[in-house]
Amino acid sequence: MLKQKPMLPRTQDAVKTPPFPIEQQWSSKALVRRWTPVIVHNALLMSCSVIGATMHVGTDEEVREFLSDNRWDCGIKVDGTALFYDVSEANCIELKFPDLPGRAAYFSSKASRLGLDGDEAQFQGALLWITYSEPGSLAPIGWKLVEKMRQGFGENRPLQTARAHFFRSDELLELKTFLLPCFVFGWDAYLIPFNKNDFFVHVSHDEYWGVVSRTRKAYDRLFAELGDLSPMESPGMRRRFCPVS
C-alpha cells in the first residue's frame, strides 16, 4: 500500500507538499456539447458536500517525487507525464468512453472503486493526475469547474499550474467528483489507488479509458470486475504502458 505523510494545516499560505504518502452511438465530443450544462450543474452540487475537506493539490514534480519514493511498492515508473510498468506480466484492459450523461458519472464511480471488492471502507486514498486538459473549445468550462471545486479546499492555483490531486481515505466521493470532468471533457488523467499496488487507471483524450495491471493475477481480477463495461485486452495500450511485456 502506498504510504501517505500527514497533511499540513489547510491555510492559504501553507507549503504545498503531497500527502505521501448508445443505443445511439455518440462520440464523447458530442456528449460534451449536448450534456455539459447538466454535468457541470450536477458536479457543482456534488462539490458542495465536500467543501472543507482536505484533498491536497500538487505539481507534476511532486507527483514524480511521490512515485519515485514509492516505486519499491507500486512498481510504477514515470517518464515526464507518462506512467508505465517494465515487468513482463504487465497487461492492459481497454474500455469504451461513456456514451450518455449518466454513464459518465457511473464510469467515474466505477473507476474510483476499482480494487475495493465492493467495500468502500477499504478505500485508502488515491492520486488523480490530470496530464492533458486542452482538447476542444469547451475545455475552459472544465478548467473553471475544477478550479471552483478546488477553491473549496483552499486551493487557488490554476489547473495548468498544479494538476495532481491527492485524496485521503475518507475522500472517495471527492475522487469521484474530480474524476468526472475527465470523462466529460475528454482529458488525459491517471488514477492511482493507494490501497492496491498492482494497477493504475488511465483516461485518454482519444476517447477510451483503461486499466494497466502489474501482474496477471491483477489483470484477471480487474477484467472480471469490469465485466459489465465490455472490457477488451489492448495490445495498443500494452505497447505504451507495458513496453517489456
Image: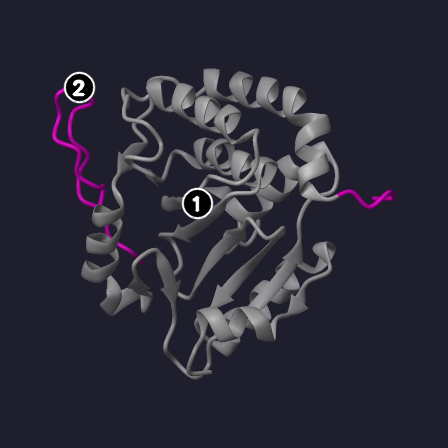
As rendered, which of 195 and 60 lies closer to the eye? 60
Which stretch appears magenta?
Answer: 1-26
Quadrant of residue 13 within the rendered picture = top left
Q: Label 1 amino acid?
A: Tyr
Helix, strand or loop at disc 2? loop
Task: Please identify the residue farthest to the right as the structure is shown.
Answer: 23
Q: Residue at x 18, y 18 (%)?
A: 12
Residue 72 drawn above or below residue 96:
below
Give the residue at mark 2. 11
Q: Residue at x 51, y 36 (%)?
A: 176
Residue 185's spot in the image, x, y percent? 57, 36
Residue 89's spot in the image, x, y percent? 46, 81
User: Is mark 2 in CB contact (under 8 Å) with mark 1?
Assistant: no
Q: Residue at x 45, y 69 (%)?
A: 241
Does residue 70 appear left or right of residue 147 in this picture? left
Helix, strand or loop at disc 1? strand
Give the residue at mark 1. 132
Q: Earlier in the sequence, mark 2 or mark 1?
A: 2
Q: Label 2 amino acid?
A: Thr
Crowdedness near tag 2: few (<14), some (14–19) or many (≥20) residues, C-alpha within 10 Å: few
Residue 133's spot in the image, x, y percent? 46, 39
Quadrant of residue 8 within the rendered picture = top left
Quadrant of residue 184 within the rendered picture = top right
Residues under labels 2 and 1: Cα distance?
A: 28 Å
